[in-house]
Each structure stands twice: as C-alpha cells, then as structure tokens.
Image (tube, helix red, strand yellow):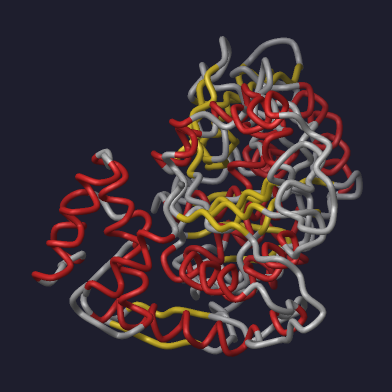
Amino acid sequence: MKKILCATYEGIDAKVVDVESTLTRGLPSFSVVGMASTSINESKERVKSALLSNDFSFPPKRITLSLVPSDLRKDGSQFDLSIALMIALNGVDDDFSEWFAFGELGLDGTVKENTYLYPLLLSLANQKLIKKALVPYSSLEKLSKIPNIEFYGVKNLQDAIELLKNQTQVKPSINQIGIEYPNYNIKNEIFYYTKEYKDDFKDVKGQEVAKRASLISAVGFHNIILEGSPGCGKSMIASRLKYILPPMRIDEILDMAKLDVLELKEPLFKPLRNMRSPHHTSTPASIFGGGSYKAQIGEVGLAHNGILFFDELPHFSKNVLEALREPMQDNRIRVSRVNSKVEYPANFLFIGAMNPCPCGNLLDDTKECRCNDLEIQRYKNRLSDPFLDRIDIFVVMQKVSRDDKSSFTSEELHQKVLDAHKFSKKRGQKNFNAKLNDEEIEKFCVLDDEAKATLDMAIDRFALSFRSIKKIQKVSRSIADLDSSEVITKKHLLEALSYRKR
C-alpha cells in the first residue's frame, strides 16, 4: 500500500488527508472511498485521461483509493494530482508519505491551480503540519510568501512522477520571498506598514473631537460609535480610519491574504488592514457565517485584524446587534449547525455610525426635527445597554460650519499611531490596548495617585460597572501612549472619561 498526503477544508482550517492506494486482483475497476464529494468522484475521469495521455497503461486490476480519515468529508479538485500519483507510482518502492501533492489535472496531464490552494497551504503551515509540497508551477510566485515550506513546482503529471522517483536529488523550485514594505523590528518581531492614503483625513474639515477620538481608537483598536446629523462626516472618518491603523505582523498579512482568497479575490500581501461594511439589510447568516451543510465565513470573520463598519447602526436587526456582542467580547465567532460546528477568529475594530433620531435633525440648529419623543426613544432603544457596554468610545459629532478647516493629514495621524505602537511594544505588550485581559490591565494600565483618586470619584459619581472601569483604563492607556507616558495621569483619565456613553 502506497500513501501520499493532501488536505481538505473543515471551516477555515485545513485538515490533512492521507491518500492511500491498493491494486488487487479482481474485475478491473477504479473507485475512491472515504466520504469523497462529487468534485472528487468526477476527478476519476480527469485522472484516467491524464494518465493515458502520459503513456500510462492501466493494469487489469481493481484500483481502490482511500481518503483517510474516512469520517471527514473531502471536497475540492486539489486531490487530482495525489490520486494520479498513487496510481502511477504504485509499483515504485520509494516512500512518499512525507510529501503533499496539490493540483487539478487537465485531460492532457497539465497541473492547474486550485482556487483554495493558497489558504489550504497557509493553514497547514500555521499548524506546522507540512514541510514539502508538489504544487502547480503557475502558483509558485503566490505561494512563495508562505514561510517554512519547500515548494516543488510541476507543469504536468509526468514532471511530478519523475520528481518523486528522484526525490533525493531534487531541490525546491523557489526561495522564500519576504514582504517588501517599510517595517521596523522590536524585540525580534517585524511590523510592516504602508504609506498609502487613498482617503485622507485632510478632506475632513472641522470635527476635531471626532478626529482625536478616531486617532485614539486606531492606537488601541477601540470600538467606537460616531453619532451626528446626516452629512457631518461620520462615514468619511470611518473610511479613512483603515489607513492609519497599526502596522501588521507577517502572520497577519498572510491571514488577510487567506481571507481574500476565500472571498475569491487575488491576494495582494499588502500591510493594509481590511474594512468590511455590510448593508443594514444583511441577514444574520451573511454577517456571522452559516450554511446547513458546510459553514461559510461571514462578514465578522472576514473583518479579522481589520475594521467592521456598521453604517446606520440602529437600522440593523436586533438579532444581528445582540449576536455581535459575543465576538466583540471574545474576539471569536462560533457557528454551530447540525452538520458542522466551526470557530473563526474575529479580532476586529468595530465602528458604528448613527443619526441622533430617525429623521436625523435632532442635533441640527437650522433644521426642524420631525420626530416625537416616543420615536426618538424607540430609535435609541434598538441599541441595548449590553451592546453599548462593548463600545469604548462614543463621539457626538460637532455642528458643521463653513469656517471649518483641515487640521491633520492621514500621514501625520498614522505617524502618531506608529510612534504609540512602538512605545507599547517596547514595554513588552503583545495585544492592543482594547484587547488586554485583566492580568495585562493590572500590569500595563498603571495610574498615578492623582489618576487613581479621579477614577474612584468617577466610579462613585457615574456608578461605573467593572467592565466600564476596565474600558476607561484601556482607553486611558492609549491616550498615554500617544504622549509616550509610562504612567496614566489625571489628564489621560479625564479625556478617557469624556468619551464614555452619556
């Protein structure tokens, strides 16, 4: 019995599959067992044609291919190459059990790229399950970004057969290619960033409080809600926030590329974080993921390491807003169905934008609000207190004036974020301020005596909950980072208190 390795998807993680083959006496036949999907059963015809096109004669035996483990559903055309190799090399004595083989076969034996090849290999690499792999030659440039894997590119089935027959003499087809963007190294961790500002904060005139709050949000990855009249700049600020976010590690860039592939987009390997902005009519399944047979990733999962932006926040369904509380708290989303239970990472920065009332004119001095008190209360009640308790920063937008002017460019704000990020990393902090756990809050969010006294007064005066206290400490930490201050002072704490929900 011969064996070679391949992989399939279970959620967004790859699972290793052993492709085993036996040729036994009996009526000539060719079967694939092990919960193979339709796409794999169809591969039998492609494999037959590819082998016959490369001068291979099928032996008059019963050919059985087993995909192990048998209780895992397998899917995808990437199994074509491994199945063909197990038949063609059945009489060869060499051991192929350490090799992975991926590729869809053409009828003439050419090895083609599979859509999900990159995320499969990246997931295997992250799990440290793979060392060397046979892949389509056309995929080498894209795959070269994935570290710690030896890639051997093959153009056709005959190349793959010859390579495995001479596996002791072959060398990898490519060298690892790094990410070529500006970066800096702190404590043996490299952080990449880009000076690209497609949407610039210089276009936002006035709104100094909102711009300051957005800067603090970017530094610490703090969830933020912008409330204001229509046209005051809420969406403008949200769309520009993605360009001033902290730099990315190589693993975050690769994960983002994996999400791009899952969404059928070409990965760019650029250190620019994603921004997802679903419409308020989106269904819960599209936001969180779902599917009766195979759970698919939703907008929350696709926003991992980036921004999730809800415009017209109160118009989202109650079910969506309440279900959002868990991933905002745990930074993970769990999709549970009868046939599948999947967990996705969902470490995102949430931005909400909303009007002060249904008609939007409540805060406008020149327009009359057409809403009565009951309508305004119903509108605000769509956001529950437990949901709002997950929001770190609340901003009421200022009135628009014709005298408003630009104050900061995105490049200037981004440099402040980079400086604050370096400052936090040099003290040994691993997570963003908004994502600190209780132990890390005690270690990094150190208040001076005056700030402690101020916080005690705020707790008594505003009846702050434990979550609110920690939230204020974390926002204060981000403000102190902008000032390069190791200790949180009264000034930092008072500014953090000014952003709490009134």
Left or right of 476? Residue 17 is: right
**View extreme (left): residue:** 449
Judge whether residue 173 can be spotted in this image.
Answer: no
Front-lying residue, 455 or 203: 455
Residue drawn at the location 71% of the way across and 86% of the way down: 406
Q: Could you tell me residue 428's position as x and y percent?
A: 22, 73
The residue shown at (78%, 50%) is 264
Question: Where residue 26 sits in the image (x, y, percent)?
Answer: 68, 11
Q: Quadrant of residue 419?
A: bottom left
- What percent of the width, then of the height, locates residue 120? 59, 48
**What residue is drawn where x is 85% and y is 52%?**
367
In the foreground, 37 or 354: 354
Above or below residue 268? Residue 303 is: above
Residue 324 position by quadrant: top right
Can residue 163 be seen at all in this image of the molecule? Answer: yes
- In depth, the one of 336 and 237 nearer the eye is 237
Side (left or right) of 101 relative to 336: right
State the residue in front, 288 or 19: 288
Measured as percent of width and height from the top left, residue 193 is found at 55, 81
Q: Residue at x 46, y 61 (%)?
A: 221
